[in-house]
Amino acid sequence: MSRKKQGFVGGALILMLSNIIVKIVGALFKIPLSNIIGDTAMGFFGTAYSVYSMFFLISTAGLPVAISRMIASAKAKSKTREVEKIYRVSLWIFMIIGAVGSAILFFGSNWIASFPKEPELSVCLRTISPIMFLICVASCVRGYFQGLQNMTPTAVSQVLETLGNLFIGLSLGYWAVKRGYGPSEVAAFVLAGVTAGVALSALYLFCAKAIAKRDKEVGLLDQEVRSGKELAKELIRIAIPITLASSVLSLNSVIDSMVAVGRMNDMGSVGLGFLRAAPGIEEGKLAISVYGAYTAKAVTIFNVPPTVVYPFAISIIPAISAALSSGDQVGLKKTMDFTFRIVSVICLPLAVGLGVMSRPIVDLLFADKDLFETASGMVTSNALAANMLTILSIAILFSGLVSVSGAMLQAYGHEKVSIVSTSLGVLSKFISVFLLVGVPFIGAYGIPLSTLICYLIMFGFNMLFLVKYVKYRFSIKEILLRPLLAAALCGATAMGSYLLFKMILPAKIATIAGIALAAVVYVIALFLFKGFEKDDVLQLPKGAFILKILIKLRLVKA
């Protein structure tokens, strides 16, 4: 196995580990936060955060990819001075973009809040506006290290950011509730803690970059580099199409928070036969409360699989760029096959498991505080979120495949065509969420349904473009069907063992036991069905050692 491949897989696994830690810490943040501040405040928090996420992606999606591609290419050609100059040029660009983004979010807060017809949202937007500048400059440093295929600084910074959210954001939210502030003010205090977490992350990244620069100063003076103007032009040429594609994709959450909530407010209900909220939810806050339950519970769980898959999308861009520079076509094909296979291996059991175990998992993680009165009786917040999660679970696989297939197109220099797939996907999202939420017997369930439609369309077009422009295609049998068989067995084991354990154990313990047993069954079935084979194991760090263990366990043939 080549060193480049070790760098790709090893870097992805480092990011994956950090993302798992981030998700665990994030759960420690969001789960008690939801229980402390309630669905209405969570609705304000989620809506403001989705608006910030859109501006964040517009500001930072393209340039980090452009930096990592250019730095990986320069490094492969041993142009060390040019690596440093790319960073300096991009830092100035990022600082300007971040300052403009923060100003728009702060001074345009009232205008933005008018779209979901929630004027109290403006205070949340103003509170979170400084993050734009901080996250832009932090993303520049992350792009620099990712181009060098050093994922450790990115991983550490993500963990620090999430720890800041946990300790500062949760503390401020708890304090605001105790002081009797309203839902929007409580959400603003929590968002102030999120801002502090990003500042902590940015500080660490600049310290890491200062150390890296000190270590690279020797032997740079004799190298020729392109001018700052040339580098800036190339950065912008690469970044603009990626930014457009990513910013269009970021409209997903904004459509949910703006279009869906506004649509439900216009209708005077959230569909599904809902008549009104039970006591405890303010009059006129039904739509934002239902959306709060959706984002705080269903979306929080749905977002776990992408954090495991996304490191491969980040790591594959510099890996492909370096391989293209060196002409390693065989390595390219193997890296792409492995990436699609690992995404399927990760996403399929999570999709099936969350689909069949949505209600037990939601009940395991969240308190069931709010009730909604319908024509047929009372419906709990957890029941609503679990039903939405069942629909979202189908989209997990396609979300992961969209992430890595889009990264492959970007790495090959076909970032412009990804705009087409994301635009068509988001257009379908806008149309479907508007139409489906307006159907009385569908109502709020139109939000996750439209997300599924969006990812299906994007994946289809991404694969079409990979075949057309890269001449790449994967085996559906090897990459999708074999892991699917193992995932189906995993889901059946999870549900069956949960129902069995529930007869003799408390429900939450039965849920954990069922998931644990299903995970063991999945790993065994995966190798029995040849969904993950010897060559895949060898690509992992310490792959030879892991393979020996699997051979001893008779899961893989020698």
Image (tube, helix red, strand yellow):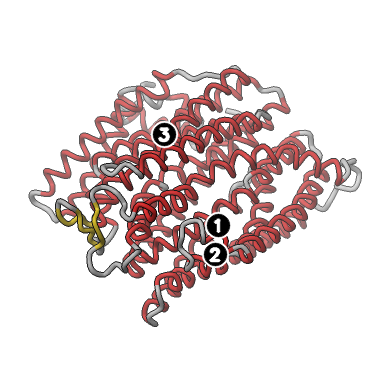
> Are dots 2 and 1 in contact, CB under 8 Å?
yes
Residue denoted by label 1: 52
Question: In the visual, does 280 lie left or right of 102?
Answer: left
Residue 400: x, y in percent?
Answer: 46, 36
Does 177 sit above or below residue 76? below
Question: In the visual, does 78 lie left or right of 404?
Answer: right
What residue is at 59 percent from the left and 42 percent from the top?
246
What residue is at 33 percent from the left and 27 percent from the top?
484
Query: Earlier along the polypeptide chain: callout 1 or callout 3?
Result: 1
Residue denoted by label 2: 125
Q: Amino acid at mark 3?
A: Ile
Does 93 sit above or below residue 482? below
Which of the labelled discs sits on residue 236, or is there none? none
Residue denoted by label 3: 453
Question: In the visual, does 492 lie left or right of 423?
Answer: left
Query: Earlier along the polypeptide chain: callout 2 or callout 1?
Result: 1
Residue 151: x, y in percent?
Answer: 59, 47
Q: Nearer the viewer, residue 248 or 216?
A: 248
Neighbourhood count class around disc 3 (C-alpha, 10 Å): few under 14, some 14–19, many 20 upward = some
Neighbourhood count class around disc 1 (C-alpha, 10 Å): few under 14, some 14–19, many 20 upward = many
What residue is at 62 percent from the left and 58 percent from the top?
135
Residue 64: x, y in percent?
Answer: 66, 46
Q: Amino acid at mark 2?
A: Leu
Q: Nearer the viewer, residue 7 or 188?
A: 188
Neighbourhood count class around disc 2 (C-alpha, 10 Å): few under 14, some 14–19, many 20 upward = many
Q: Which element type, helix, strand or loop, lies under badge 3? A: helix
